[in-house]
Image (cartoon, rainbow, N blue to C red):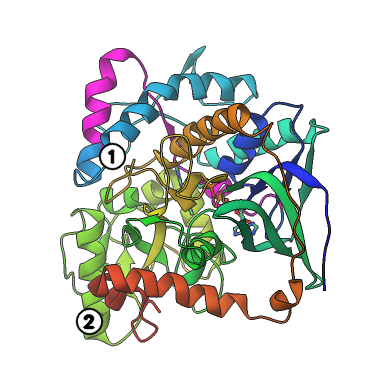
Amino acid sequence: MKDMNQTIDVIIVGTGAAGIFCALNLPDTLSIHMVTKDSLENSASYLAQGGIAALRDASDYDDYFEDTLRAGHYKNSRKAVDTMIRQSPLIIRELLDYHVRFNRTGDELSYTKEGGHSQSRILHHNDITGKEITSKLLNGLRKKSNIIIEEYTRMVDIVVRDGQCIGIVTIDKTGAPKVLFAKAVVLATGGIGGLFKHSTAFSHITGDALAVAVKHNVKLRDVNYIQIHPTALYSEKPGRRFLISEAVRGEGAYLLNAAMERFTDELQPRDVVSDAIHEQMIKDGRGYVYLSLTHLPAEMIITRFPNIYQHCLKAGYDLTKEPIPVTPAQHYFMGGIKVDLKGQTSMPYLYAIGETSCTGVHGKNRLGSNSLLESLVFAQRAASDITQNIPYRPTEQPEIDLSIYQDKDFDLEYKNIVLDEIKRRDPKFYEEWCNDNSQMG
Ligand SMILES: Cc1cc2nc3c(=O)[nH]c(=O)nc-3n(C[C@H](O)[C@H](O)[C@H](O)COP(=O)(O)OP(=O)(O)OC[C@H]3O[C@@H](n4cnc5c(N)ncnc54)[C@H](O)[C@@H]3O)c2cc1C
């Protein structure tokens, strides 16, 4: 089977905050084709609750820089952190231009604090900041006549000639493979949560771009830097897990083992608490421990955590009366496809942005509310680089044999490629959190 096609200027894979903002920052004179594996709205960007961090004024630069590095165990790329922080006020202004409604006190933007931040520098829209930002950006996208969006279409490969990227191969709902040629390809496919039994992200987000990168020897970076959130509501059902915010332990909730005894200090850093829970789950021989707030006043629980309370109630647990089962869950991917500060990967004309890329900005551990910001900052920079470099690129459309893409189990093949890569770099992390035989598998 062969496929011939018109050359597009830019293909963007993924419609999360990174993919959408990149498209919005490209000129209207370029033809842009976006593909997304599921519906437009089903991205981690939509799920972001807490907010987006930003430099409030110049006096906060040093503290913000230090907070980001401290959270990242000083493994961050300092240049990337500097770039992100300096560009943040501009990004916020642009979001306001797209009519994003951040919470305000009077006329002034209302900045809040979160764990790890020494200053109040987080903007939010109630506890649905990701939805507010992404939906407003999507409104902007819908007005553009130079952008085509294909939903329920999965990128399964990139097309490479003479070591350069010239397009992608997709499979739509019908299972039919198709080739799309382009002058530049941007991978914005998000994280790897779907590879884990327990993740706070959507299960269709499975790190496909990483597997494709490995197949074509595109460089990766820090693939073993994966954030595990200590407490998600335990469930046997497939699909994403509901996050039980750290603030719940901050307010005094206890972690309990099978004998209903406390087994660790609940206020230690995320990774330490996750490890303690994992160890306890092995001792107890089951995939969860309990989180209990029953010793706290019911009224406080209901007013302080209305969404969590309601969600747990729907799942059959009354937080004010009984402990809930919780398990650590994969939450964020700090590593990814290695990129420079313009989103360029090690392959010419192939870009990566957002959670699927790794600028090194988060180091070993992401500071809360830095990821939406990172996605937007580096999406904009990639768009600017593409605008300068690709319009005059000569294009070719070689014949592509698409039969090799038919009736293949990409889920299994790509899962193995990504998990093998993590295992190769960090066998200990793999055994604890990724191995099929572990509680998380
Ligand atoms: C529950 C939760 C709460 C969070 N809270 C915050 C917060 O408060 N603040 C913060 O800064 N960050 C937060 N984050 C992290 C943040 O939301 C993400 O890191 C960020 O939005 C990533 O954006 P992205 O565009 O890179 O990826 P995503 O938004 O995940 O988008 C990925 C896109 O790629 C598509 N895709 C994937 N594979 C393919 C393929 N093979 N072919 C075609 N399309 C594909 C998906 O369908 C999707 O459209 C949170 C994350 C979660 C899960």
Nearer to me, 223 or 287? 223
Nearer to me, 297 or 346? 346
Circle 2 crowding by C-alpha within 10 Å: few under 14, some 14–19, many from 20:
few
Asked which secondary structure carries label 1, the reply is loop
Q: Is residue 396 left or right of residue 390?
A: right
**For residue 55: magenta?**
yes
Classify residue 285 by image quadrant. bottom left
As measured in the structure, the alpha-carbon distance from the residue carrying label 1 to the one carrying label 2 is 44 Å
Q: Reading the chain from its start, which is encountered first: label 1 or label 2?
A: 1
Asked which secondary structure carries label 2, the reply is loop
- Disc 1 residue type (three-letter): Ser
- Disc 2 residue type (three-letter): Ala
Q: Is residue 150 above or below residue 282?
A: above
Q: Is residue 193 above or below residue 394?
A: below
Magenta part of the chain: 40-68
Classify residue 325 by image quadrant. bottom left
Q: Which residue is mark 1?
A: 77
Circle 1 crowding by C-alpha within 10 Å: few under 14, some 14–19, many from 20:
some
Residue at (58% x, 75% y) in the render: 411
Q: Residue 418, position in %: x, y?
A: 44, 69
Q: Which residue is mark 2?
A: 259
**For residue 60: magenta?**
yes
Q: Residue 136, position in %: x, y?
A: 66, 33
For the C terminus, the quadrant is bottom left
Nearer to me, 386 or 367? 386
Q: Residue 320, position in %: x, y?
A: 39, 60
Q: Is residue 36 left or right of residue 215?
A: right
Residue at (25% x, 53% y) in the render: 252
